[in-house]
Image (cartoon, rainbow, N blue to C red):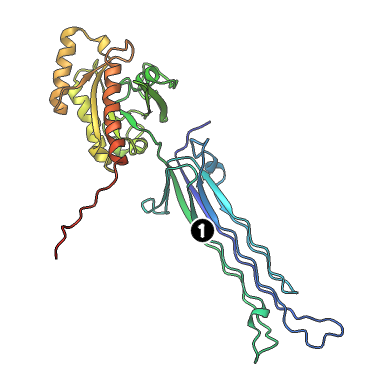
Amino acid sequence: MKFLDQAKVYIRSGDGGAGCVSFRREKFIEFGGPNGGDGGRGGDVWAECVAGLNTLIDYRYQQHHKASRGQHGMGANRTGAGGKDIVLKVPQGTEILDEDEETVIADLTEIGQRVLLAKGGNGGFGNAHFKTSTNQAPRRANPGQEGEERWLWLRLKLIADAGLVGLPNAGKSTFLAAVTAAKPKIADYPFTTLHPQLGVVRVDQREFVLADIPGLIEGAHEGIGLGDRFLGHVERCRVLLHLVDGTQDDAGKAYKTVRDEIEAYDHGLGEKIEIVALSKIDSLDKDARKKQVKKLAKACGRTPLELSAHSGEGVIEALREIMKVIDASRAHEAAPATEEVAPWTP
């Protein structure tokens, strides 16, 4: 199945049915009176977060979604049937934005969440509704209200506890394959990863979800390479693992390139906790390894981790550092909010 993380859709709720103008006409009934029924209500448009989906590919081939209209009222005081609702089923982590792509209407992060996107029009009143003591034979009825219509953007942001960032060929996919059951494509050329990948990591009898996104290059925020749109998939992460290829000429420069792109992307990504690691250390001799660690430490302002997903060296230590940050974040969220109580005064 092709991965699609953004789609534009048109929605329209159903129009309300029109009210009916009708009079009771039966033999031997001298005073029949008005008996026109009300129109039915138009169907609503809902969005629902469901399990089992991980892409928005369905909305590429079906862009227009319209709820059915309510039926018109009928004689004998019969109210028209209401229109059927329609539900847009989306994967967990989907943001629903207005047409301007900035106004967030809803953020569906939990299975079962529902949000009303367009309300159906009310049905019109039949002439029986307008009967009064001074107007016992009204000959008017209301038309149904029109439904709402709008264009919306659906944007999927994967939900993961930790995210991998770095230049292309920094060893992110190899790391993901080494610590999870995921099977990302691995090759010796840039941009092997074209779509985000998820995997579940198990360390010290605990688990967390790890996300891998396509690599960033200089100028990604301007659309160079694959751009920086995929950074949206690590916006929800609690911690970022920044892998820097140790076989490059200057590990410090490589780190700054990616860091500049993260800062340019904004959306609070630059403020997230970052763990920096020098990868592919199995390909370096002792002197080269020491030199790259020194350059990277100078660039990031702290001593980086050293690991090799191929040989397994330093991998467990990196996972434990990630788990430590995730545990602290979860504990902070679980802690009840304490309210300051003002001291009692007479």
Answer above or below: position of 235 versus 311: below
Answer above or below: position of 325 versus 80: above
Q: Which residue is mark 1?
A: 118
Residues 289 and 126: in front is 126
Residues 103 and 251: in front is 103
How far from the left and from the top, in percent, is residue 225? 34, 31
Report whether residue 333 is seen: yes
How far from the left and from the top, in percent, is residue 29? 83, 85
Which residue occupies 33% across, 30% down? 163
Q: Residue furthest front?
A: 346
Report whether residue 166 is seen: no
Q: How many marks?
A: 1
Q: Residue furthest top?
A: 285
Which residue occupies 69% across, 70% down? 73
How far from the left and from the top, in percent, is residue 82? 64, 62
Q: Classify the position of the C terminus by image quarter.
A: bottom left
Q: Residue furthest bottom?
A: 134
Three-letter residue code for mark 1: Ala
Q: Mark 1 Cα within 10 Å, few/some/many (few <14, many 20+)?
A: many
Determine whether the residue tagged by mark 1 lies in a helix, strand or loop. Answer: strand
How far from the left and from the top, in percent, is residue 85? 59, 55
Q: Is residue 285 left or right of residue 228?
A: left
Which residue occupies 61% across, 69% down? 123
